[in-house]
Image: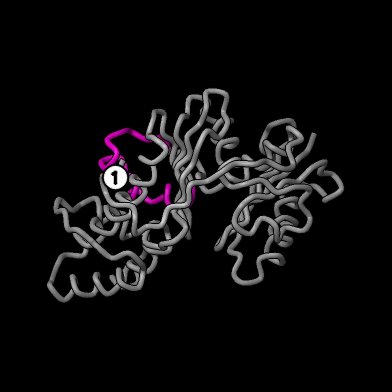
Amino acid sequence: MIVAGIDLGGKNAHVVVLKDDEILAKGEATTGIQKAAAAETVYDETLKKAGLERTDVERMVATGSAGKRAAFADGVIPDAAADVRGVNRLFPSARTVIDVGAEEGRAIKVSPEGRVLDFAINEKCAAGAGTFVEAMARALEISVEEMATISLKSTKSIPMNAQCAVFGESEVVSLIHQKVAKQDIAKAVHDAIAGRIASVGRIVGLEQDVVVIGGMANNKGFIDALTKEIQIDVIVPADPAFIGALGAAVAAASGVLDEKVEATVVEQETVTEGEA
């Protein structure tokens, strides 16, 4: 059986094609404003990699904040459900999933059967997601990759109090004017994000094994900060940004075209470091 999943987010799209539970091809693209068109393009390009046509795919399931824009999908499932299905396929021992993408972060409590028990999501503040890192990297005039690398060289803890990317950038500029080293500012940024994500995780309860996915899982500065914040070693899968798409494809293989899960939506102002 050939199935596919697409994770269509606010900034990027990821596609996974499965044949008899084995990955045939993966594809990704930046979506921009024209999300529906971008979804069509990246889906067709991924099928081409696999040597397939759309008619070869028995079922396609979409997920992500813009998942409903994928008109070719047979069904749409929530991000949390896709995350857990994707993680469970790779790590059945996972009991907590942390997904941090460009626009939001979520923590999911997973049952031993690989189902969503509870999850909390911070969708009100970019200071808890990858967009914040990109904005701070621009302020520091370095790449996101360099920012992650140099943050690991810092031994200082500098608090950042900004609750949004705009004020965060002003805070970074202020630190630059104070002659604070870039590596220390970079660490402060990652520590701030880790603190916010950890607070969201504590709402559902952090239990091993903890698997971190989403684009921010590729950021070793963030992973280091998060590990220290929650004091639990985390697992980062290969290609962590594709896990949602993988989970959507797994759902398609199982014949699941719709799934209901309830979220706790967290307004960042009510979440502070150390909140349980």
**Image quarter in which the N terminus is found:** top right
Depth check: give the residue in front, 110 or 54. 110
Depth check: give the residue in front, 8 or 267. 267
Q: Is residue 101 visible?
A: yes
Image location of residue 199, percent across then percent down = 33, 46
Q: Is residue 221 visible?
A: no
Q: Which residues are magenta?
A: 214-235
Which residue is at a point 12% across and 73% down the rendered structure image? Answer: 178
The reply to whether the magenta stretch includes residue 226 is: yes
Which residue is at a point 56% across and 43% down the rendered structure image? Answer: 262
Depth check: give the residue in front, 149 or 6. 6
Image location of residue 257, percent across then percent down = 74, 42
Position of 61 relative to 66 (above/below): above
Determine the secondary structure under disc 1.
Answer: loop
Image location of residue 184, percent across then percent down = 19, 59
Position of 81 relative to 215 (above/below): above
Which residue is at a point 17% across and 58% down the rendered structure image? Answer: 158
Please, which residue is most extreme toward the right here?
55
The reply to whether the magenta stretch includes residue 62 is: no
* Quarter of the rendering containing residue 67: bottom right
Position of 178 relative to 253 (above/below): below
Given the image, on which type of amino acid does mark 1 rest? Glu
* Quarter of the rendering containing residue 267: bottom left
Most common secondary structure along the magenta stretch = helix
Image location of residue 128, percent across then percent down = 38, 57
Would you name the residue on which mark 1 appears?
275
**Image quarter in which the C terminus is found:** top left
